[in-house]
Each structure stands twice: as C-alpha cells, then as structure tokens.
Image (cartoon, rainbow, N blue to C red):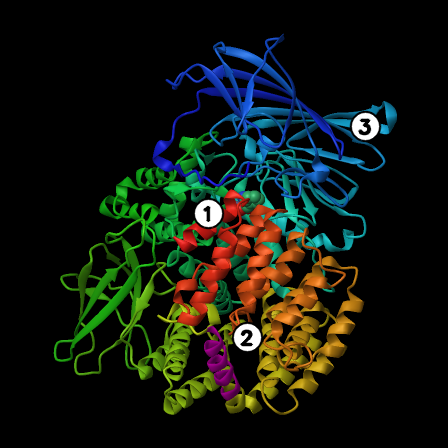
Amino acid sequence: MRTDQPVTIRRLDYQVPAYLVDTVELDIALDSERTIVEAKLGIRRNPASTAPRMLVLDGEALEFILATLDGQPVTPVIADNRFTLADVPDSFTLVTVSANKPSANTTLSGLFMSKNGFFTQCEAEGFRRITYFPDRPDVMARYRVRLSADKARYPVLLGNGNLLEQGELPGGRHYAVWDDPFLKPSYLFALVAADLVCEEQTITTNTGRTALLQVWVENGDLDKTHHAMESLINSIRWDEQRFGLELDLDRFMIVAVSDFNMGAMENKGLNIFNTKFVLANPQVATDIDFANVESVVGHEYFHNWTGNRVTCRDWFQLSLKEGLTVFRDQEFSMDMIAAAAPNAAVAASGKAVKRIDDVRTLRAAQFPEDAGPMSHPIRPDEYQEINNFYTATVYEKGSEIIRMQQTILGRDGFRRGMDEYFRRHDGQAVTCDDFVAAMEAANAHLGETADLSLFRRWYSQSGTPVLSAEREWDGNTGRLTITLSQHTAPSVSQPVKLPLHIPVVIGLLGADGADLPLRLDGESGPAPTERVLHLKEAKQSFTFTGLPAGEAMPVPSLLRGFSAPVVLDHDLRVEELAFLMAHDSDAFNRWEAGQQLMLSVIHARLRGEDAGLQTSALVEAMHRTLEADLDPAFVEVALTLPDEAYIAETLDVVDAPAIARVRDELKRQVATGLEDSLRARYTALGVALAAAGEYRPDPASAGRRGLRNLCLRYLTEIEGDGLQLAREQYAAATNMTDRFAALTALAHAGAATAELADFFQRYENEALVLDKWFTLQSTAARVPDGSSQPFVLHVLGLLKHAAFNLRNPNRARSVILQFCMNNPRHFHADDGSGYQLWAEYVLRLDSLNPQIAARLARSMDRWRRHTPERQARMREALQRVADKPELSPDVREIVGKALG
Ligand code: PHE
Ligand code: ZN
C-alpha cells in the first residue's frame, strides 16, 4: 500500500473494463477482530474489450481465504493489491472468501468501527477493502447482501435498498438481508451495524408512491434529528418541483456517525453522514449549523439522481456528479430562503446573501488552490491519489461551470438539458462531455446560443481568468464602448492558456442610480436593463447606444451575480464604487462594490499609506448601509471586511501577520466611526428578536441574529461597554447562536477565560459543541486571557487536552487543521513554530489516517508567496515531511507537488 514511487493515473489512458459484474451477493459476518466476507459475483466478459482474457480484481488490506470459479477451487495470484486469475471463461460465477479487521482500520475507508458499531465508506476506492472486486465506477451491478452480527451490541443492521428478511441466529447473533433493485457502482455500497435509534416518517411522492424516511442516530440524540428530517422532506419536494425528479426507493435512510473523514456520503438509499451535518437543535447548533445541515442533506439526496442513477465513468469525471450536485444544493438553499421570505424584495436579497456566501467560499478556498501547486481543471487530467481530488475546484468551481450553462441557456433551457441528460443516460456511467452534449442537444433550436464547443474549455483548462474592462464614453452621442479582455496565467501543467467563453452579466446605472436600457449598436426594438455579454475571444468590444447624451458616463455594473468564476480587474474610481454600493439593483454587486472599496483601503495601508480620506469615505458608506432600511442578513455581509485568505490572494507577496494587523486596525476604525449606530442596532435587534418569541433558525431571524452579533463583534474591538455586553449576552443566551457568538467576541478580545471554562463544563458531553470550543481557541486572534503567551503553546495545550483525540477527524480538524488553515497570523509566527507543529502532525496523522493528513498537508500549498524568511522555514518543514521514507501516496502527492 505504501510506496515511494508515486504512480500517476491519466485520464486519456481510460480503458473499458475487461469484465463486467452483473450480480453481487455478499454474506458479511461482522466481527470487530475478524469480519468474514463471502462474495458471489456473476461475471461476464465485456464485449467491448480487447484486453487479454485475464480477470484482475482490486483488493486492499484483505486476508485471502479461498476462491472458486463455477464451484471449482482456483488459486489467484495476489500481489500489489490485485487479485489476478488467468484464462477465465466468458461467463462465470466467482466466489471469494476473505477476512478483514475493522477494529484496526483507522483510515475510515472500507469497513471501520466508530464507537457504537460498524460503518462503511466506499467512495472512492474503499470497496476493495471489503472484498475483491473491479472497484471502478463503470462496473455497475445489482447487489444483495446478508449481514450478521452480535445482536446485543449491534441491534440495527442496515444495507442499501429494501429489507427482504431478518431473524435470529445461534450464539446471540442475528441477520438481515438487503436487496438493492438499482444498478450501482461499488462506491455506493454501504452497510451499518450498530446500536442506533431513529426518527421516521412516511411520505407520498408526487406520483403517489409511499416511502419510509429514517434518520438514525445514537441513543440520546433523538432530540437533534428533526431539522435533518425536515430538510430531507424539503429536498424531496424541491427535486420533484424544480427538476421533475422523484424519490425512486421505498426506503431512504440517513445514518449519523461521529468518526467520518468527509461531510457525508450518498450511498444508495443509505446515506452516511458526519454527525456535524445531521444533529441540530437550538441548544447545540448555530444558525450556520442549521443551514449547513439543510444544504448537506439536500446535497446527498440530490446525488440520488445526479451521481447514483447517472454516475461517473471514471474518477476524472468526478465533477460530473459533484459540480452538478453542489449547484443543485446551492439552488435548493436559495429557493428555501426565497420561499420563507414575506415578499419579493426580501426573497431577492436573501438569495443574494446565499450567493455572496458561496462566492466567499470560492474565493477563499478555490482561487488559492487554482493558483498553487495543486491547480487542476475541474476535470483533472491526472492524479496520483484520487482522494486528493475531492477539491474546491471539482466541487465549487465545478458548480460555477454548471451555473454558467444555466446563465447561457436560461433556466428553461437548462431544465430541458437536464431532462435530456436523464433521458439519454439513466442507469449509465458517463462523462462530463456527455452532460454538455445533452445540454446542447436539448437546446439546438436556440441556434448559436446552444453551441457550447468553446465553453467546454472550462472543463479542460485550469486557473482563474482575469477579466479586465475598459470604457470609452461619447457624451455627445450617448455611446458607451466597453472593451472586455481576458487572461489566464500559465501554470506548470498548462504553459499556454486559451480564451474561454465567459458570460458577463451587465447593467448600466444612470445618474439617478436606476438601470438604463441596454441597446447594442445595430439593435432595435425593446431593450432590456440587464443582459449577458458573451466574451469568447481574448479581447472584444461592446458598444451601447442611445444612452443619455450630455450626461456623465453611466456606471457599469459588471459580472452581476458573479456570472463567471473570474477575477474582475475593474477600473472603477472610489466614488463610482460608493455609487454602486448605494444604488446597484443587483444586490450581489452592491456587496461587491463595498468589498472592492475595503480592499483598496487595505491595499493602501499595506503599502504604508495612511489612506485617511478613502477610509472616511468607506466608513461613511458603511454607516449609510447600517442605517438604511435593508434586510439585516444583507447588512451583515455588507459590513464584513474581506477575509484574510481573500486579501492574501490579491497580493503578490503575503505577510500574513501584517494583513491581520491592517484588517484589525480598519475594523477598529469602523467600530469607532459607527459606535453609536452599532450599539443602537444591537439593542433594537435584541428587542425585535425577543418579541418574536422562541428561537427559530429561519432566514429572517437568523439574519437579525447575524447582524446583531456582528454589531457585538465590532463593539468588542474598541474600548467601551462591548465586553460587558458580550458577557451579559453569553450568560443570558437561550440558544447556541447567541451564546457562541458572545464567546467568540470575548475570545478574540483575549478576555474569555471564565466563559471558556463555563462553556466546557456545560457542553462536556456534546462532542460537536466541544469541537466548536476547540476550533474557537485554535483560530482566535489572542490566547484566552489576552496574555503574551506564544500562541503555539496554547495550541500545544489544546492538543494535550484530555478531550482531544487525534483519531476522531472532527476533533483533529478542530485544533490542528483549524490552526494551520484558519489562523494565518499565528500559524505564520516569525519563529517558524507553526510550521514545525504542522510537520509533526502531518506525520503523526499520516500513520493513522492518510486522507486527513493530506488535507492538513495542503495548508502549505501557497508557501512560495510568503516573505523570503518564512518561505525558507516553510520549505524546511515541507522537506522534513518529504524525507520520511514511509509516506502515504496521499501525503506524498501533496508535498511532492508543493516542492516540485
Ligand atoms: N461524495 C461525497 C459528497 O460529495 C463526498 C465524499 C467523498 C464522502 C469521498 C466520502 C468519501 O457528498
Ligand atoms: Zn457530493
């Protein structure tokens, strides 16, 4: 399994499978020390293959016991994680018996144990750790599985599909037989055997079928399942309405497990979730947690069609299911927000806030990835370890590529394309290209609009394009020419970048702030006030005519709604940004104008300029936003400064502590300038929330709490009564959102000793809340008592805490990953102590759980952009990891690319 010779797998080397598996019958006798798996596979030669007549199966960390072919014993060659049998017939039944040891499986891939039972994780290549199999997504089979286990310890036995029978066995054991009526790839196989309880409900689908929905959790957590169940029902309804896609199973189960590498997994009919994305009630979960549960429940449910019914031909096509399913969950969340809104204006603003959140994630996580050593197209061309490619690029940028297709084809056109995709490919394993082809075919009647041949380049080219805009205004004739150009910086694997098809949604604001009609030169007839410009070349000009002559140049609002995943290099003056911030009819661009204003102040200050005038203009504009009659959720995002990661991406040389310092200073100035308004708003929102009664996580009240807690956060940045307010709020809070926000404000101010101790005591038995406690301390600006203790010592203390556990991914992430990824000012301490801690924990984690180790390893990706002294220390730490002879392929790939 471990090797020093990295093996690169290439997309263009794809070969169809030599043998297909039609049926899989598994008999799994679960035992923590020795689980015995008997697999009966109905195999036939693939008529489309020309490969030699040799059966090759994958198998990893398995003990081989025996094999028979059509009832006759056979002796396979077993080496290098492969099971090879020469000269097999065209069609045969293969039986294998193997054993594995779940209690020793710390990788959490394959069959593993979490405190209360057995669980599986098979994506991407975990099934081969359960039995010998052609473990690739283009081998789709019908599965039946018989599970048996000790009844007292593992009273619940779950599998994919329908429960056929269950019963008692001698020796205190019991069994259950599950049958999945749908063809599926091995990565969607799952089983659970544990001591669990469930909340359940039956629903009727849009065609009148009934289905049983269950949310399974540990005993004691049934008071935290309701929101997940409600989210599941909402997801089912949404997919029926928006895409005409129905739940196809009689039973749909969600199971929560506390040891899990990722967020959740879409196994057919048996989704397995990290507890973090299932369990929620007002006492333990924040508004953000509630929203995340809804979004992840939706995401996994939507995979039932986009991923499961139609799956990926090979892992290079991962974005086929992930980009599309992220797009679907983003749209679902937006529609849920809109549905809860009292009127169209609030609905539009709520949707914009969700879009803003998603774009912030893209900029903070995907843009840096695409500019660093792990840069890859959304459909990668090569990988060493597929687990390293569950990335922000495949997921979040992948979703942007789908969103652009909807922008280009329109909502109806996009829906037609989706219908055609399922009509063509239901039950198949296909490629990204098949998806685009379905979109094109279904919209052929639109002519050139539906020609996505150039658009396809988004799938093959990596990097973030920079889009530049220049303007030329002829005030005498009312003609405005906007020249758009695009440039993508070369990368190691792609030294030459080509122009992309970029849909640029645009509006033009007149002197009164209203949108002007947009008529391109040569057009007649009615003119819309917003439209899509299609940039397809390196440089293109668009001339708008009939604009008010004799007036000042209209102000362009470009890339509305963030219509493409690019960096917009605008030439707007400070006054124009302030104008857009106040008047743009597109809420996203109102927010964006504010962010650009903030960035320009931060840049000036980082250059050592005092930027006094610009700062007062910014503070004034922020003041107007705070005082205006706007949706509180929007005000909250509009008053939040760009985060450190995004600021770093806009600079050539990164001095992380300096960025944090400048951002802090600006925050204090904003707080000082807005102090009275902040306090007034804090109080007024408190009154409104109290009057609204009991806590509910709906968008309107979450928005009020969000803005109120932002006000508190600003007030604790300056001298005054901020800390006092925070202490009072902490003590009086009736929900986790308010309590944790108060604790956060105190912790960043270095004044949280008492409250942190109190918080620990209150929630000692709530693992997910303790994760928050660890995360907060690892990402804080100061140590809890505000003393001058080196921060890294505090982190070391957390790592030695009795409640810390490196084997539990959520807990490991809450300290070590959070510190390395989300606390740049202290991670980049001058003495290099952060980097040493990083190296030590990458190595420690690698021998337990390579996937988590590789995630941590990635916090060094952008090392070449830091100051020279830091670069030297970072390189040393990287080298220390690279020099270790026994590294997993996962970490080997990450550090190899970072140093390469
Ligand atoms: N396919 C899962 C999702 O996106 C993510 C995942 C990948 C989970 C690999 C586990 C292992 O929903
Ligand atoms: Zn997914």
Query: Relative to the observer, which residue lies in front, 373 or 125?
Result: 373
Please tell me whether mark 2 sits on a helix, a strand or a loop: helix
Spatial CA distance of label 2 from label 1 is 45 Å
Q: Is mark 3 within 8 Å of ligand 1?
A: no
Q: Amino acid at mark 2?
A: Pro
Residue highlighted by disc 3: 174
- Mark 2 vs mark 1: in front: 1
Give coordinates of residue 469: x percent, y percent.
24, 68
Amino acid on which the number 1 mark rests in the picture:
Glu
If you read the primary sequence from the N terminus, does the residue marked by circle 2 or circle 3 appear first? 3
Q: What residue is disc 1 on?
A: 893
Q: Main secondary structure of the magenta part?
A: helix
Q: Are marks 2 and 1 in contact (CB under 8 Å)?
A: no
Q: Position of residue 821 (x, y in %)?
A: 53, 63
Q: Provide residue 629's location: percent of width, then percent of height.
A: 50, 80
Displayed quadrant of residue 721: bottom right
Q: Looking at the picture, does residue 875 appear above or below residue 586?
A: above
Relative to 94, is 4 on the left or the right? left
In the figure, is residue 81 to the left or right of 689? left
Indicate if the residue with disc 2 has its beta carbon within 8 Å of ligand 2.
no
For this view, does 43 lie left or right of residue 483?
Answer: right
Q: Which residues are magenta?
A: 656-669
- Residue 596 percent location from the top left of the image: 38, 75
- Secondary structure, mark 1, is helix
Residue located beneath label 2 in the image: 632
Q: Residue at x 17, y 64 (%)?
A: 541
